[in-house]
Each structure stands twice: as structure tokens, then as C-alpha cells.
Image (cartoon, grey):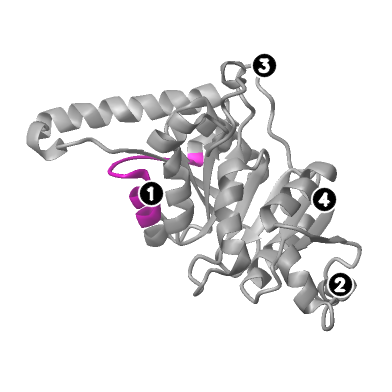
Amino acid sequence: MSSADPVPNRPNRILMATDLSARCDRALDRAIQLSGQWQVPLLVVHAAPREAIGAWSAMETLASIRQRIGRELQGDVADADIHVEEGEPAEVILDVARREHCDLIVLGDTSELPGRRLLGNTVETLVRSSPTSVLVVKRRPRGAYRRVLVGTDLTPESRHGLDTAVALFPRAELTLLHALDIPYESLWLDPARRADLNRMEMATIEAFVVEARLPADLRSRMQLLVEHGHPESMLRRHAMEHDSDLTVIGAFRRGLAFHLLVGGTTRRIVQVAPNDVLVVRAPVQPDARRPAESGSA
């Protein structure tokens, strides 16, 4: 990392979004755990769709929803700041995160639920367009993250993801995996060429780690892997085989063309990963600051 690069720090504030479903309990527990581990404030937000307010007004007002969330937090983080606002979930979450200067948004994964509830599409929207990092929680927390899998495509964005993983989880077992999808690999790669390619790929990822300027002790114990196949498939397989707690990937907002050709990989990784996924939003590079580039992961 050059001296001009921003050094990733721990979040100053965590925003946890809930639709009050049971699935969000896992995300709440993880947000509470991270808030305590990093000693940073926790905010909880719930968005009540405008069309539902009228139907709920006789039974559950915004104030009563706030009280319900407060009861769930009692004994864990009694001083958490609770926001219950009317509006579309993604819009409310982004507005509160921006207004309250939150550095990390924590969401529960609802992709396996019938109908996916309100938060299902919200996860996709935030992964695609949130200017801050997003943690999608799938597993019930069992303490701090112990085994962290970092995906890289050797871009500056993925290096920022690695730097952030190291800064946030310095005691975890870290694995850096670079996946290459080589068309018709078996047709043109004989054993000798495959061996040469493997050596070249390993040298490349080792150089990538050197450029990241990680602490020597961490670099010596970090596992480096190069796999051939679709990134989402390789990351999923490794996470399942090695019981990784968390997958970390770096991304930042780019234009529509990038999103259609490359950026969809981020969404697919979030969808198929069996563990929690942290999408680290890297700073926008100078050559990406153009009005036409509205934002895609």
C-alpha cells in the first residue's frame, strides 16, 4: 500500500437493518458482537413501507415498533440508537447511514425465505449501490470471526478488501484466494504448461501480497491459493470445505457496462456463499469519478 492510499480503519459506527423477521436475529447478534469487539456505537434501523402504515396503524405504530426493537436489545446494547422511519427499505437505510455517518451496514440474508420478505431485494440493492461497506449475515454467530476467506482479482479494489480484512480481523486465520476462469483449459494446457502457469500465478499473487505491505507475521501465516473456475464457485467450495466464517470481497461503484460484464460476480458471490459475506466498498478512484457512473458492485 502506498503512502497515498487510505488506511482502512475500524468502522466508527455500525448500522444494523432489520425487517423484524426471525432471520434478522442472526444479523442483530453479529452486529452486537462486532459493536462490542470494536467498541463502536450501534444503530438499528427499521423501514416501514408507506403502503403498510395505514394497515398497521391500528395495531402497530412506528412508536410501538421502536419499543419492540428496544425490548429485543435490552441487556445487550441498551444504549443503541434506534431509527424507525417510513419509506422504502433501501432508501431509508442509505439515508440513515449517510445522516448518521455509519461506516458499515449489517443485514440479514433472506434469500432462502419464501417471498424473500422486504429485506431480500434490499440486500441486492445495497450490495450494488451502497457507498459504504455491507455485511450480509447468514450464520448464527459463535463468537468472533476465526477463519476469514478473502477473494481477490488482483485489482486495487480487492487489495483494499484484503487490507480491510487484515485491519478488522487481525487474529483470524486468513486465506487469500484468486480464482481464474480459463476457457477450454483442458484442451490446450498440457501438464508442463499447467505447471508453468501455476508457478506464474502463484508468483503474481505473492507479489500482490507484498504490495499490500502486510505485517510480516501475518503474511507468513496467511494461506495463498489460486484456483481455476468461476470465482463464486471457487469461493463457495473453499468456504464449505474449510468452514470459513466470513468471505471478504472488495468492490466499488462503476458504470453500467462494468456492472453487466464483471460486477455481477459480486452479487453472485453474496448469493451462493454459505457463510457471511463482507462487501468492502473501496474509495472511488480518480478516473472513475464521472457523472455517468452511477454505481454498481
Question: Can you tell which mark lies on residue 20?
Answer: none
Question: Can you tell which mark lies on residue 3?
Answer: 3
Residue extending farthest bottom:
59
Cβ atoms at labels 4 and 3 below 8 Å apart: no
The mark total stands at: 4
Task: State which tag comes first along the sequence, 1 or 3.
Answer: 3
Instruction: Give the residue displayed 12% in from the left and 32% down from the top.
Output: 189
Residue bearing mark 1:
232
Residue 58 inside the magenta-drawn segment: no
Task: State which tag comes first along the sequence, 3 or 2.
Answer: 3
Alpha carbon separation for disc pair 3 and 2: 43 Å
Crowdedness near tag 1: few (<14), some (14–19) or many (≥20) residues, C-alpha within 10 Å: some
Task: State which tag comes first along the sequence, 1 or 4.
Answer: 4
For label 4, the SS is: loop
Observer-nearest of 228 and 106: 106
Left or right of 187, for residue 283? right
Instruction: Give the residue displayed 57% in from the left and 16% down from the top.
Output: 287
For label 1, the SS is: helix
Task: State which tag comes first along the sequence, 4 or 3.
Answer: 3
Three-letter amino acid code at the position of disc 4:
Val
Quadrant where the N terminus sits is top right
Observer-nearest of 174 and 152: 152
Residue 232 inside the magenta-drawn segment: yes
Above or below, 122 relative to 182: below
Tell which tag, 1 or 3, sits nearer the viewer.
1
Residue bearing mark 2:
70
Three-letter amino acid code at the position of disc 3:
Ser
Tell which tag, 1 or 4, sits nearer the viewer.
1
Task: State which tag comes first along the sequence, 1 or 2.
Answer: 2
Residue bearing mark 4:
40
Instruction: Give the residue displayed 68% in from the left and 33% down from the top.
Output: 8
For label 3, the SS is: loop
